[in-house]
């Protein structure tokens, strides 16, 4: 366990500092699950100007950020592929749904595991480590809730930290 933490810390330390939307993360224990941030082309979420994505089995699942006032933390809410969003969606604002969408706790850490409690924004420094314990259960037990896709199938991902592994243009702007 300690060796795993030291290896992850050294991996993150070897990646140059970069902006959040340029960061690519790998889930510890598997290189088949990657994650990152993408800038919103039409800002429909006002907690952050970024979306969060997780790619499993070659398919990206998209999430927007939610941050309640006070002692609430940062949450991920399943969202649709931002490439499908239009200026009209931005102008319409959030749609009312009969059900509260699932929310996944989302924690961010610096290279020394210091907590980052601000909602990520474009041009902010990329966190070195991410933790979203509820993503695995959501994608396994309720895959249709992730992105509102009724054809989604369950995928299994372990509960683990995501470590910054690369800095480049992998996240890009949503909709590009």
Image (cartoon, helix red, strand yellow):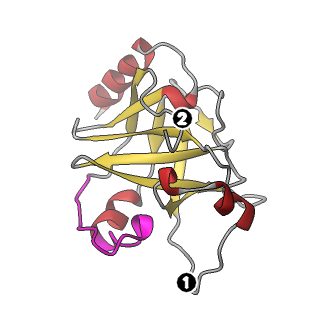
**Residue at the image position 65 percent from the left and 62 percent from the top:** 89
Q: Nearer the viewer, residue 125 or 90?
A: 90
Q: Position of residue 129 (x, y in %)?
A: 46, 34
State which mark lies toward you, 2 or 1.
1
Q: Position of residue 156 (x, y in %)?
A: 22, 58
Query: Which of 58/27 is in front?
Result: 58
Please give the count of numbered marks on the rendered protein: 2
- The residue nearer to you, when weighing 114 against 125, is 125
The crowding category of the residue bearing disc 1, from other C-alpha atoms within 10 Å (few below 14, some 14 to 19, many at least 20), is few
Residue found 42% across the figure and 71% down from its top: 148
Task: Note whether residue 13 is visible.
Answer: yes
Distance CA(mark 2)–CA(mark 1): 31 Å
Q: For mark 2, give the secondary structure.
A: strand
Relative image position of residue 141 (x, y in whole percent)? 30, 73
> Considering only vertical position in the picture, is 120 above or below 145?
above
- The answer to whether residue 7 is above or below residue 72 is above
Q: Quadrant of residue 88?
A: bottom right
Looking at the rendered image, the quarter that the N terminus falls into is top left
* Residue underneath mark 1: 99
Residue 113 in view:
no
Query: Given the current orientation, which residue lies at the most extreme bottom position?
Result: 98
Q: Is residue 64 left or right of residue 28?
A: right
Q: Residue at x 35, y 26 (%)?
A: 8
Question: Would residue 69 appear left or right of 118 to someone viewing this image?
Answer: right
- List the residue tagged with mark 2: 109
Task: Specify the segment rendered in magenta.
Answer: 141-157
Q: Is residue 136 magenta?
A: no
């Amino acid at each position: 366990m300690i060796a795993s933490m030291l290896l992850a810390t050294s991996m993150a330390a070897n990646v140059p500092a970069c902006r959040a939307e340029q960061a690519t993360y790998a889930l510890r224990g598997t290189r088949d699950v990657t994650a990152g941030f993408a800038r919103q082309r039409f800002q429909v979420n006002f907690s952050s100007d970024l979306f969060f994505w997780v790619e499993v089995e070659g398919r990206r699942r998209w999430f927007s950020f939610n941050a309640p006032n006070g002692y609430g933390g940062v949450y991920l809410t399943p969202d649709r592929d931002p490439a499908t969003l239009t200026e009209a969606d931005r102008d319409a604002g959030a749609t009312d749904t009969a059900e509260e969408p699932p929310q996944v706790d989302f924690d961010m850490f610096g290279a020394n595991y210091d907590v980052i409690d601000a909602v990520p924004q474009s041009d902010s420094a990329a966190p070195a480590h991410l933790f979203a314990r509820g993503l695995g259960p959501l994608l396994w037990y309720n895959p249709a809730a992730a992105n509102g896709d009724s054809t989604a199938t369950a995928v299994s991902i372990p509960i683990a930290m995501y470590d910054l592994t690369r800095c480049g243009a992998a996240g890009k702007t949503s909709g590009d």
